[in-house]
Image (cartoon, coloured by chain):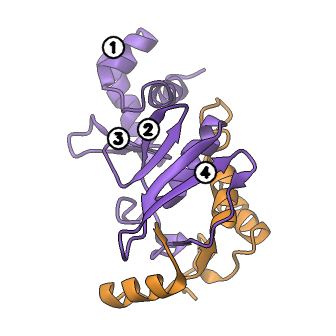
Chain colours: A purple, B orange
């Protein structure tokens, strides 16, 4: 395996195991490589739209479906609470972990809370809706807004 | 990419934000999107869907139109 793939998998494993973003030196320690090599891999993964980095170029803002920062979208799986980037990604965390979970979020207009059980076959019946304001061709123009 | 309690709440929000109302997605359709994008995300084989794959995923879930076309230059 190449370093970029190793780094990508290590990031996702860290999120899955801890619920939080890894620091670059944590990835370096896990892979037994130097931190600058990890930061170089971060930059290549950002160019491939695998990661979104904070302005410092070192902190992970997004490793979709995981969010590196707290958000209103939380996936609860086996007692662990993971922050997601958006409504799509909060389902995505449960899909990625391949375990039943609960989605916690809210109606963006009213603030009414949403708590939804999700099995591997899908969510419990619900008439809530998902809405995306940005067309697919422009999702990555500003992925944080999307 | 947000949740709303109903179509009426979507329309209110879009009006307040001065944004067009986009196609509404049921949560069972959203689960289809989530699994298509992320079910293998923790595995070495994971990769983001390419445009043709995206179109096929959207079509399979009943999400049609230019809004869902990753290479469209106009949006319904």
Is disc 4 surrounded by few (<14), some (14 to 19) or many (20+) residues within 10 Å? some
What is the C-alpha distance between the residues marked 2 and 4?
A: 14 Å
Query: Residue A74, percent across and down?
Result: 44, 48
Q: Circle 1 — which element? A: loop
Classify residue A145 as left or right of residue A58.
right
User: Which residue in the structure is indicated by mark 2?
Assistant: A81
Distance from label 2 to label 1 (Cα)?
30 Å
Label 2: few (<14), some (14–19) or many (≥20) C-alpha neighbours in 10 Å? some
Badge 3, how many Cα within 10 Å: few under 14, some, many 20+? many
Mark sitting earlier along the chain (3/2): 3
Determine the residue located farthest toward the right in the rendered image: B60
Mark 3: secondary structure:
loop
Judge depth for marks 2 and 4 and give the one in front. 4
Using the image, tell me which numbered label, if any, was put on residue A117: 4
Give the residue pinned by disc 3.
Answer: A68
Which of the two discs, 3 and 4, labels the residue nearer the N terminus?
3
Does residue B47 appear in the picture of this structure? no
Quarter assignment of residue A63? top left
Q: Position of residue B70 (x, y in %)?
A: 59, 69
Q: Dividing the picture into quarters, in which one does residue A97 lie?
A: top right
Q: Secondary structure at mark 4?
A: strand
Question: Is residue B63 toward the left or the right of residue B4 in the image?
Answer: right
């Amino acid at each position: 395996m190449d370093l970029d793939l190793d780094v990508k998998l290590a990031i996702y494993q860290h999120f899955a195991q801890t619920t939080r973003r890894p620091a670059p030196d944590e990835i370096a320690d896990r892979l037994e490589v130097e931190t600058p090599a990890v930061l170089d891999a971060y930059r290549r993964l950002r160019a491939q739209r695998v990661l979104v980095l904070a302005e410092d170029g070192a902190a992970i803002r997004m490793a979709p479906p995981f969010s590196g920062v707290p958000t209103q979208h939380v996936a609860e799986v086996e007692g662990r609470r993971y922050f997601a980037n958006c409504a799509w990604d909060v389902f995505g965390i449960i899909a990625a972990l391949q375990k039943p979970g609960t989605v916690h979020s809210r109606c963006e207009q009213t603030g009414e809370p949403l708590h939804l059980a999700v099995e591997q076959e899908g969510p419990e019946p619900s008439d809530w809706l998902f809405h995306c304001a940005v067309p697919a061709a422009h999702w990555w123009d500003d992925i944080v807004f999307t | 990419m947000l949740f709303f309690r109903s179509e009426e709440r979507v329309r209110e929000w879009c009006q307040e934000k001065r944004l067009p109302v986009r196609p509404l997605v049921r949560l069972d359709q959203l689960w289809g999107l989530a699994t298509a994008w992320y079910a293998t995300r923790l595995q070495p084989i994971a990769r983001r869907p390419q445009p043709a794959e995206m179109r096929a995923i959207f079509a399979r879930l009943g999400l049609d139109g230019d809004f869902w076309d990753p290479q469209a230059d106009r949006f319904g």
